[in-house]
Image (cartoon, rainbow, N blue to C red):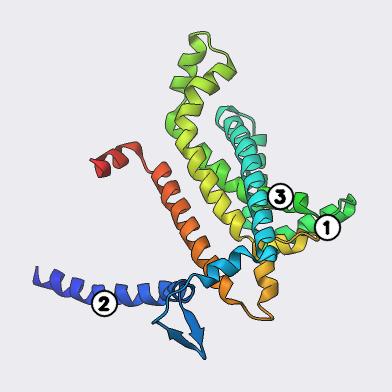
Amino acid sequence: MRHGAKTLALLIPVVGLVFVILYGPIFVPIVTSFFVVRHAQIDWSAPTLDAYLRLSRNEGIIEAFGNTMIVGLCAVAAALVIGTVIALHYQSGRSRGREILQFVVFLPFLMPPIITGLSLLIFFREIDFSRSLVTIIIGHTAFVLALVYRTVLVRLQAIGPRMIEASYDLGASFWQTFRFILLPNLKSALVGAAILAFALSFDETMITILVTGTQNTLPIRLWAMMRLGFTPDINALVALILALTTGLVLVAARQLMPAEFSADTSG
C-alpha cells in the first residue's frame, strides 16, 4: 500500500505537467478572446466580447467556414453511403475481390495526405476536371471513407449473421431487413462515424491545398493568414471551434460506447 501511494503521489504531478504542456497552449487563445491584449500583456480588468463581434463581421472567415461546413457535410454523407454499402458487401461476400476492395478503401487513409492529394490532383488534371468545392468533397470523401467503413464493419461483425438470416427466413426482403434489422443496430455506429469523419474533414489541410480551386475552406484561409499574423477575432474563432469539436467528440464517444457500459455509467 505504501509503495502504491508513493507511485501515485509521483504520477499525479507528472500527469499534471503533461496535461499543462499538451493543453495549456489551447487555453491561451480562449482566454485572450475575452480580454484585450496590449503590448503582450492581458488587461484582466475589462472582459469584452469585441473579438466575437469582429468575427461576426469578418466576411472572409464566415465564407470559408461555410465552405468547410458544406465540404464536411457532403463528404460525410457520401462516405456514410459508400462505406455502409462496402461494409455490407464485405460482411456478406465470399469472393477474394472484397479483400482488394478493402485495400483500396484503406489506401488513401493510410498514405501520407500529400500523396493522396497529389494523386487526386493528377487525376483531376488528366480528366480535365476543374478544381472547386466538388474536388475538395471528393478528396475528403476518399480520406474519411476508411474510418466510416471500418466503424460500420465492426458493428456488423458484432451483430452477426443470425439476425439477418432469421429475417430472410421469415420472408423479409433485403430492404426490409436493412430498414428494420440492420439500420436500428447500426444507428449509433453511423452517428459516431459521421461525427469523427466530420472532425477529420474539418481539419484536413494538405489534401485540400492540392485539390482546391478559388473557394477556400477555413484551414486554407487560416494557413494564408499566418504570413500576416492573426487578428483578435481569430482567438474567438478558435474558442468556438474548440467548443464545437469537444461537443462532437463527446457525442461520438457516447454513441460508440458499448450499450452495457453506457447503462452502467448512467445508472
Which element type, helix, strand or loop, lies under badge 1?
A: helix
The one nearer the camera, 5 or 22, is 22
Residue labelled with disc 2: 13
Q: On the rendered image, what quadrant is the C terminus found in?
A: top left
Camera-nearest label, 1 or 3: 3
Mark 2, Cα crowd under 10 Å, few <14 / some 14-19 / many 20+, is few
Amino acid at the residue labelled 3: Ile
Considering the numbered disc 2 on the image, is that residue within a helix, a strand or a loop? helix
Q: Amino acid at mark 1?
A: Ile
Identify the residue shown where x is 63% and y is 60%: 204
* Residue 247 shows up from this direction: yes
Q: CA distance from mark 2 to mark 3?
A: 44 Å
Mark closest to the chain's N terminus, 1 or 3: 1
**Camera-nearest residue between 147 and 263:** 263
Q: Are the residues tagged 1 and 2 within 8 Å (C-beta)?
A: no
Q: Is residue 173 above or below residue 231?
A: above
| Dot 3: element | helix
Distance between mark 1 and mark 2 Cα atoms? 51 Å
Percent from the top left, x then y, of residue 133?
A: 75, 52
Disc 1 and disc 3: Cα gap in Å? Answer: 16 Å
**Quadrant for the N terminus in the image:** bottom left
Residue 211 in the figure: left or right of residue 235: right
Under mark 2, the amino acid is Pro
> Height in image: 224 above or below 157?
below
Furthest residue toward bottom = 39
Mark 3 Cα within 10 Å, few/some/many (few <14, many 20+)?
Answer: many
| Residue drawn at 46 percent across, 27 percent down | 184
* Label 1 sits on residue: 122
